[in-house]
Amino acid sequence: MNSFFERKYVIQGIILIVAITIVARLFYLQIIDDSYLLSANNNVLRKVIEYPARGVILDRNGKILVQNEPVYDLMVTPREAKNIDTALLCQLIGIDKEGFDKRMKKARDHSPYRASLFEKLIPKETFAILQEHMDKFHGFYTVDRNIRTYPDSVAAQFLGYIQEVNDNDIKRSNGFYRSGDYIGASGVERSYEELLRGTRGVKNQMVDALNRPQGSFMDGKYDTLAISGEGLVSSLDKELQLLAEKLMRNKLGSVVAIEPATGEILTYVSSPSYNPNLMVGRERGNNYMKMLHDPYKPMFNRPIQASYPPGSIFKVIAALTAQQAGIINAETRFHCGGGYRYGRNAIMRCTGFHHSTDLITSIQKSCNTYYGFVYAHMLDRRGMPTYQAYDLWRAGLMQFGLGQPLGIDLPGEKGGNVYSSEYYTKHFGSNKWTSSYNISQSIGQGQLGITPLQMANLTAIVANRGFYYRPHLIKGIGEKQIVKKEFTEKIWAGVDAKHYEPVIEGMSRAVSSGSAAASKIPGIEMCGKTGTVQNPHGENHAVFFAFAPRENPKIAIAVFVENAGYGGTWAAPIASMLIEKYIRDTISLPKHIQDRVKNAVILPKVKTKETKTEVKPKQDTTKKTTSSGNSNQQATTKSRNTGNIIVHHSQVRRNYAQR
Amino acid sequence: MHNDKKGFLGRIDWITIILWLVLCLIGWFNIHAAVFDPENPGLFSMATNYGKQSIYIFTALIIGFSILIIDQRFFISATPFIYIVVVLLLVTVLVVGRNVGGNQAWIPIGSFRLQPSEFGKLATCLLLAYFLNTQTNKNPTLKGLVVGACIVLFPVFLVMLQPDTGSALAFFSLIFVFYREGYVSTKLLIFGGLAILLFVLALLINQWLLIGIIAAICTAFIFIFGKKRKYLIDLGVIFAISSVYVLSVDFAYENILQSHQRNRIDIILGKMDDPKGQGYNLNQSKIAIGSGKLFGKGYLQGTQTKYNFVPEQSTDFIFCTVGEEWGFVGCVTVIAIYIFLLMRIIHIAERQRTTFARVYAYGVASILFFHFFINIGMTIGIVPVIGIPLPFISYGGSSLWSFTILLFILLKFDSTRKGLSQI
């Protein structure tokens, strides 16, 4: 003890003050502030995404249209990548030293400690060799991915393709997609994206300070498994599709075949097509650009995006709507003197001199005069102003699914074009116009625009005698084979069943002894109608639509071949072969006709540098090639001015502009 | 020595020994958690830090009890010798020492590395006690203070040459000894505290503004205490000194401190934010402790420490493991044990009959307190990062043994206090 004894309390006080300070600070750090726990979890947690397998798409007979193939992403953790055999790695994955350095720098800029993508989508063949040498590439590892693969390279526009998401996709999805994900960009892949993509799994992995994996977080309590996408069964018949694509090779146009009883699409050809396998893998970018610059626009989904005047096949609808309106009946006759005179010096020429023509014959012989009269009666003799009658006429067409999208399960469907009376009133300057002002619509020319899908659907309506189901491509979703509700709904086309018989008889005769007689199928009663669509920009388009058999129809088909001339020459044989193939699984048309169709090259001449060598002049010997060449070129170059008439290359362009 | 064996054991302060042992075990468990490798979870491996630490603890136990049987007069008479040996070691380390982390603080002896500065504290405490003991029955003199200060500052000087600032600073905690013995007045202690406060403020606030604030405070004092002449002079002197001090802080800060030390201070003061570079240790340490919440993540469940996010996690940053795995409750427990130990040592100090033992006891308390405060303080971001171990808990033989010897010599003096009233 000495005199400074009491100073012990000062020292003790200081110690206690320090202790209290520390405890207070700890209380703040550990109890009040929650951010540290978050930071600790951020430090240690790596969410590893498990990618689900995308849904497989089968055809109606269970054959695979598209499936998945394993590919591999090569990842690198720059800090661990030391003393590696650079030359060998470059050689194996096919890059040069410069490319290696570039990738390495990018990865290092991202993070020296974390894995970055080095090379994506390495095919399994390359992977097999790479795998043997992986021990020489310290710091590299591979991640399993899937790409789409198409065993028969079939139905490209139908299936569509997938691509890496862009910033817009990510934004739109409210964060569902992340950079590097794939998304359906067109076709079924896009319209069924939400079903096909499946659900991503997340594995919560722990890593140490050097980002080395250290096992799962909380024994996987918060992990979720990847759920594969739903499988889809399409309505497509793969064999039929293959044949149709073969027949349409080197031609521009569409083939759409529908099962009338269900609205299921059996064949969906947009020609020229492309190999869907080109749209996956590492060469995708190059291939995509090539196709984008292809003058024949293989990416253009013609059956739903191209709209053409229907030509003579429109007469079928005209006959039906006129009967329903009570303007004509099966016995109504008009005199055909080689054309329909709609003005003092204005004659709409007919295909021949049909004299006194009844309804059946008018269809069989495709009499323009008859339908000039029908149109005139429909519009001008109904006790009301023409523009009102016109709207009634138009309403009838709308009930057949024209002038609006049909609602197929594909993105980007166009509705075609049927102008309303306001358009003409505005166009002609008053509402005093009459049928003669737009008489060409009576025979499916002029400003009418119909997509090949709508044409096929018209056939299906006729086959069904009055109704249709929305045409669709997917007939079953998932294991339960669910059909979307909108595709099971029966839609009435507005014309009573009894009015169909004379029309069908006419169509039957058109095939047995009319314009499509060369394409008739022995033993199967096919009912069809040819059309030749006037094309102010070049050679006429050939169109043919038909269904068979007459009773209890199995298939309704529309074939549209651009610049091919008469419908009976090119479109009808194609339809005939497809129908017979579908119903009987054989083709009885003579072999030389089959070959003639298959081998024909009907492509308009395109004068562009890059495609000069590829483009062959039209080889149809019955046509003059020189004159068509120039005008077709006009069609492509002046397309913006052509509006909605005929070829609609403008839509091709617009279509790409949207991408 | 006229006591029988039983009596000898009975006179040992078992409370302190139990506290010591508890701290050692807490250390051992937390070192295990800090270096725990989930892929190789064997509890006992001599290759790992916790395996080695168990040997150190065992050895420390032997050393401790050996000290208890040695005659305390040996320590007293050997004190000058011990001091000289340690000084020689501190010189030796500058010549042959191994450079670890920028400090030439280690002498390699086989696989073991000796850190002489740890033993420097022991020798200094002993010699200081030895010297102040000679001043018993005298009033504290300036000469006594100067000699005592030299005893302390000489090893500080040698340690600074390594340069091991952290260990050097620890010696300054011995100011409490001078204070307790009356060589330093309470006023001076307060001034010391104010000087530290001013130092921090001078770094935080514009120096002219700070001088203005001081002037305002002085003026306020005049109004409160009246205009007595004595006060006015005092306040004037205080104002002048503190102004010069404030102005010189900036200069000293920029020119005397090394850049990494400046950075550490800047980070603590919030003047610099660099969680990936200079502030990485502190940031990760705070994350580890903060993420422990009330009860912690559980033994061996700390992700921050287990996966090496916190550097030096078994030595200087061992408290992170406590904070992360045992939470606030665990931290407070450890702090409580330390406070209990420190209070116990002060209690022991005050019951000593010799100046030697009392001075020595306060020396032990000061050193332990300084380490406790600075080490825990740096892990939670209230003092700059200074690399000194947490006594008995941090991994390392030198540190554990030197603290153990420090403590057990005190227990030896305490156990024989009744037979020793004058030396």
Image (tube, coloured by chain):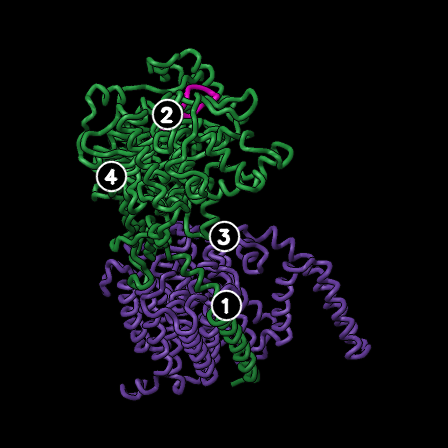
Chain colours: A green, B purple
**Chain under disc 1:** A
Question: What residue sits 34% from the left and 41% below the top?
Answer: A500
Circle 2: residue type: Ala
Q: Which mark is residue A237?
A: 4
Q: Say if labels 3 and 1 share a chain.
A: no
Q: Quadrant of the N terminus of chain B?
A: bottom left
Mark 4 to mark 3 CA distance (whole Å): 68 Å
Q: Tell me the CA gap for discs 2 and 4.
A: 24 Å
Residue A130: image x %, image y %? 24, 35
Residue pictured at 49% horizontal, 40% vertical: A393
Closer to the camera, B369 or B157? B369
Chain for numbered disc 3: B
Whether residue A268 is visible to the viewer of this picture, yes or no, is: no
Q: Where does the image place residue B44, in percent across and percent down from the top left?
A: 23, 64
Left or right relative to B174: residue A183: left
Tell which tag, 2 or 1, sits nearer the viewer.
2
Q: Which residues are magenta?
A: A532-544
Disc 2 residue crowd, few under 14, some 14–19, many 20+, Cα 10 Å? many
Of the numbered discs 2 and 4, the one sitting upstream in the chain is 4
Q: Which residue is mark 3?
A: B278
Whether the magenta-drawn stretch holds residue A355 is answered as: no
Q: Disc 1 residue type?
A: Asp
Inter-mark Cα distance, 3 to 1: 23 Å
Depth check, mark 3 against mark 1: the one in front is 1
Q: Residues within 10 Å of mark 3 (few under 14, many from 20)?
A: some
Sequence-wise first label, 2 or 1? 1
Mark sitting on residue A33: 1
Q: Which residue is mark 2?
A: A542
Quadrant in which residue B4 is drawn: bottom left
Q: Residues within 10 Å of mark 4 (few under 14, many from 20)?
A: many
Mark 3 or mark 2, which is nearer to you?
Answer: 2
